[in-house]
Amino acid sequence: MTTAADDALIAILRENARASTAEIARRLGVSRTTVQSRIERLERRGVIIGYTLRLSEEHTGALIRAHVLLTILPKLIRQVEAGLRAIPAVRMLHSVSGNVDMIAEIEARSVGELDELADRIGALDGVERTSTSVILSTRIDR
């Protein structure tokens, strides 16, 4: 479980994982040593498991992103997951409740590439049905 102070620190790191301890300390109103020790504690406890790269809209704006909703034969879920994991254009995969079993976020450089990718996903053994929605814009990205 995290404290309110930890949650505030995590929120800053989500905005910019490369923020300096001095900048974080200033924003939180604590010392740099406190920030560093909190980060180390969160890493040791497995709350923070890594840091990631966020690309600029200028770079990603050229990509076409979409959500692919998948209905999967229950006995083949692991096989479908492995097949999706092998496709680099699948950026994220969620297991969900409701009318579908999984939602994959994919990205492609063209509509044609996106179409081929959607067909490739739909052809995986165990995939019963797909529905693809192109992402027009991202309004919030934290």
Image: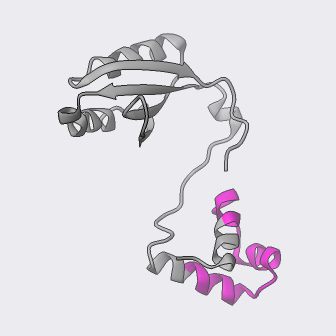
Q: Which residues are magenta?
A: 11-39
33 above or below 118?
below
Q: Residue at x 46, y 66 (%)?
A: 49
Please name the residue shown 68% across and 59% down the image. 16
Given the current orientation, which residue lies at the most extreme front position? 98
- Left or right placement of residue 64 versus residue 57 in this view: left
Q: What secondary structure is the magenta-colored segment mainly?
A: helix
Q: Quadrant of residue 84?
A: top left
Q: Is residue 116 left or right of residue 86?
A: right
Please provide percent x and percent y for residue 61. 67, 28
Can you give x and y, in whole percent of width and height, for residue 118 in the image? 40, 18
Q: Position of residue 47 (x, y in %)?
A: 49, 71
Q: Is residue 49 above or below residue 73?
A: below
Residue in the foreground of this view, choosing between 131 and 137:
131
In the displayed structure image, the side of residue 68 where residue 63 appears, left or right:
right
**Display colour scheme:** one colour
Residue closest to the eye, 104 or 101 = 101
Task: Identify which residue is drawn at 40% across, 29% down.
Answer: 100
